[in-house]
Amino acid sequence: MPPLLLTGRVERGEGIATGLGCPTANLAVEQGVIIPSLGVYVAETVLEGSTFPSVVCVNDGRTGTNLKLEVHLLDIRTDLSGKQLSVRLVRKLRGLVPWESEEQMSALIAKDLGDARAWFAHSAS
């Protein structure tokens, strides 16, 4: 997959990912922007001129009609509300899977974060 760059402003979300231990910035997607398939991606996120390793979930919300990009900056905790982000999706980790419990989803998120950290460690060497 060639890298895809998406840019937008962070909007307030529902806080579900934060409750699962993985706070995300919800990036507003402009109408008509071409995006890749739904799923979880390794990404590089540019915030105020600095680039951060990140994980992005492209999903259609709980209703199946509300396209969302949820960006998690690895090992960075800061309020991104209202900030402008540029996100370069560099590798798809997996497609979306239904989850039955918060514990199951937390475990899956932890695996995604570990896989992304391993990808960045390998690509840096």
Image (cartoon, rainbow, N blue to C red):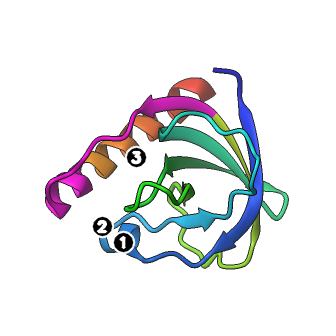
As for residue 91 lying within the magenta part, the answer is yes
Q: Is residue 38 above or below residue 76?
A: above
User: What is the quadrant of residue 81 in the picture?
Assistant: bottom right
| Secondary structure under the numbered disc 2 in the rendered image | loop
- Determine which of the numbered discs, if any, sits on residue 113 in the image: 3
Q: Quadrant of the N terminus?
A: top right
Q: Earlier in the sequence, mark 2 or mark 3?
A: 2
> Which residue is denoted by mark 2 in the rendering?
20
User: What is the quadrant of residue 80 in the picture?
Assistant: bottom right
Residue 115 position within the rendered picture, expressed as x and y whole percent measured from the top left: 39, 35
Q: Between tags 2 and 1, which lies in front?
A: 1
As for residue 35 lying within the magenta part, the answer is no
The amino acid at mark 3 is: Leu
- Determine which of the numbered discs, if any, sits on residue 16 in the image: 1
Tally the marks. 3
- Whole-Å distance between the Cαs marked 2 and 3? 13 Å
Q: Residues within 10 Å of mark 1 (few under 14, many from 20)?
A: few
Q: Is residue 21 above or below residue 50?
A: below
Q: Is residue 61 above or below residue 10?
A: above
The residue at the point 50 percent across, 65 percent down is 24
112 or 119, nearer to the observer: 112
- Whole-Å distance between the Cαs marked 3 and 1? 17 Å
The amino acid at mark 2 is: Leu
Which span of residues is magenta-colored? 90-107
The residue at the point 72 percent across, 34 percent down is 4
| Secondary structure under the numbered disc 1 in the rendered image | helix
115 or 39, nearer to the observer: 39
The amino acid at mark 1 is: Ile
Are discs 2 and 1 less than 8 Å apart at CB?
A: yes
Residue 122 position within the rendered picture, expressed as x and y whole percent measured from the top left: 52, 25
